[in-house]
Image (tube, rainbow, N blue to C red):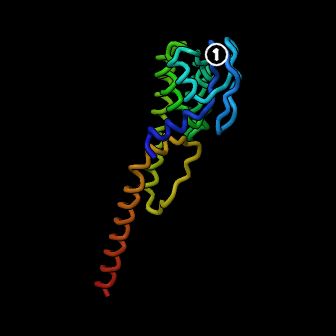
């Protein structure tokens, strides 16, 4: 899975919009959405919010977890914890990216939101690199427990970890082969 596929999955998340039109319910495979009443908030998938926003038919409301005060708390919790903290959205990075690119005029303090989310991402990536480094340094390390990772964070690891684990296994097999050869030679 690549980042674009993860972002596609993130577009299924619901967000509140304030439509500027009236319309009945829309029946989709995933369920019904609406009815839409001008000036009354309604929850819709992000993909629909984007489409309506681009047609200038709605205003997208900032999710609670994207409020600056809440992001500051999340950032501080992440900074204080040596483990990965649970994120308010499994798609926090991609949802932030999508919403701020499409509806930046609907949000207050867009640059601050971007900065804090990027800071959170950087802290989590640093923890992830440290965790993987510790795993590779441990001679008997064959697995790691990484709770609370998001799909985008896992996707960022995918190209690196399997090949690294393969290389470590090859090195270990070579060392075992050399040891067994040295043991046979000393007999």
Residue at 49 percent across and 16 percent down: it is 104
Residue 33 in the image: x percent, y percent?
68, 28
Residue 56 in the image: x percent, y percent?
53, 14
Most foreground residue, 183 or 171:
171
Residue 44 position by quadrant:
top right
Q: Does residue 109 appear anywhere in the picture?
A: yes
Q: Does residue 129 appear anywhere in the picture?
A: no
Residue at 65 percent across and 39 percent down: it is 29
Residue 33, above or below 133: above
Question: In the displayed structure, does residue 129 sit left or right of residue 167?
Answer: right
Most foreground residue, 25 or 62:
25
Residue 2, above or below 10: below
Residue 12 in the image: x percent, y percent?
58, 35
For disc 1, the neighbor class at 10 Å (few under 14, some 14 to 19, many from 20) is many
Most distant residue in the bottom direction: 187
Assign the C terminus to one quadrant of the image.
bottom left
Residue at 55 percent across and 48 percent down: it is 146
Question: In the displayed structure, does residue 172 sit left or right of residue 24?
Answer: left
Residue 106 position by quadrant:
top right
Residue 18, above or below 165: above
Residue 171, above or below 65: below
Most foreground residue, 178 or 71:
71
Most foreground residue, 159 or 140:
159
Q: SS for tag 1? A: strand
Residue 25 in the image: x percent, y percent?
70, 26
Q: What residue sits right under mark 1 in the picture?
A: 18
Count of numbered circles in the view: 1
């Amino acid at each position: 899975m690549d980042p674009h596929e993860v972002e596609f999955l993130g577009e299924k998340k619901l967000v509140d919009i304030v439509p500027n039109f009236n319309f009945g319910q829309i029946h989709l495979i995933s369920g019904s959405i609406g009815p839409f009443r001008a000036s009354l908030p309604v929850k819709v998938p992000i993909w629909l919010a984007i489409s309506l926003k681009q047609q200038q038919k709605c205003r997208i409301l900032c999710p609670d977890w994207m409020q600056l005060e809440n992001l500051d708390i999340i950032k501080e919790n992440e900074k204080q914890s040596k483990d990965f903290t649970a994120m308010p959205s499994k798609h926090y990075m991609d949802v932030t990216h999508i919403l701020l690119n499409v509806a930046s005029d609907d949000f207050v303090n867009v640059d601050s939101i971007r900065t804090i989310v990027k800071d959170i991402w950087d802290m989590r990536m640093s923890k992830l690199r440290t965790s993987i480094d510790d795993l590779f340094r441990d001679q008997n390390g064959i697995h790691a427990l990484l709770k609370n990772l998001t799909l985008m964070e896992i996707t960022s690891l995918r190209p690196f970890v399997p090949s690294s684990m393969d290389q470590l296994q090859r090195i270990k097999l070579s060392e075992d082969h050399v040891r067994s050869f040295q043991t046979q030679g000393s007999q």
